[in-house]
Image (spheres, grey):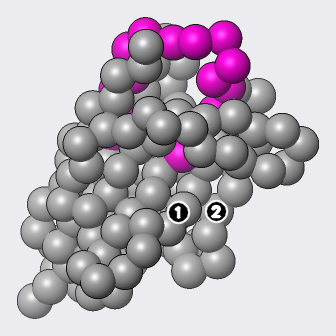
Amino acid sequence: QVQLVESGGGLVQPGGSLRLSCAASGSIFSINAMGWYRQAPGKERELVATISSAGSTITATSVKGRFTISRDNAKNTVYLQMNSLKPEDTAVYYCNAGVVRGATYYGMDYWGKGTLVTVSS
């Protein structure tokens, strides 16, 4: 099984920065990528960014240029560096394990509990 634990959320002012971490333990052969999703109140969960075991990344248009996903394989940890935060970035951020096939990310049903990011003055 795969276990995922997010950390790093909190309250930050607009324009500020925050770095989220996702520590992973356990694995299955099919998993070769990780992703960050977020869910704002009253909205559907959306994919923010992904990174494959080969290092390829995908970033949602809404956060491109502001958010960067990265990994540390030695620590089995994935990060989401969030800069120039906006109030609309407020959401619970979830770490997800999945598979990349070609240029497409397929999220699987492995989730962390989520970490809340609140961007407000």
Q: Disc 1 designates what residue?
A: 48
In screen coordinates, is 109 left or right of 33? left
Q: In the drawing, what numbered circle is on residue 59?
A: 2
Residue 27 lies in the magenta stretch: yes
Tell me the quadrant of the picture where the N terminus can be found. Answer: top left
Rendering coords of residue 35 (x, y %) = 54, 46
- Please name the residue shown 14% across and 85% down the image: 120
Q: Is residue 23 above or below residue 119?
A: above
The reply to whether discs 1 and 2 touch (Cβ–Cβ < 8 Å) is yes
Q: In this view, does 79 lie above or below 93?
A: above
Observer-nearest of 116 and 21: 116
- Please name the residue shown 32% across and 57% down the image: 93
Task: Give the quadrant of residue 85.
Answer: bottom left
Task: Please provide the residue range marked out in magenta.
Answer: 21-35
Q: Is mark 1 on a helix, strand or loop?
A: strand
Residue 26 lies in the magenta stretch: yes
Amino acid type of the residue tagged 2 in the rendering? Thr
- Please name the residue shown 13% across and 60% down the image: 10
In screen coordinates, is 77 left or right of 64? left
Rendering coords of residue 92 (x, y %) = 26, 62
Rendering coords of residue 101 (x, y %) = 84, 38
Mark 2 Cα shell of 10 Å, populated few (<14), some (14-19), many (≥20): some
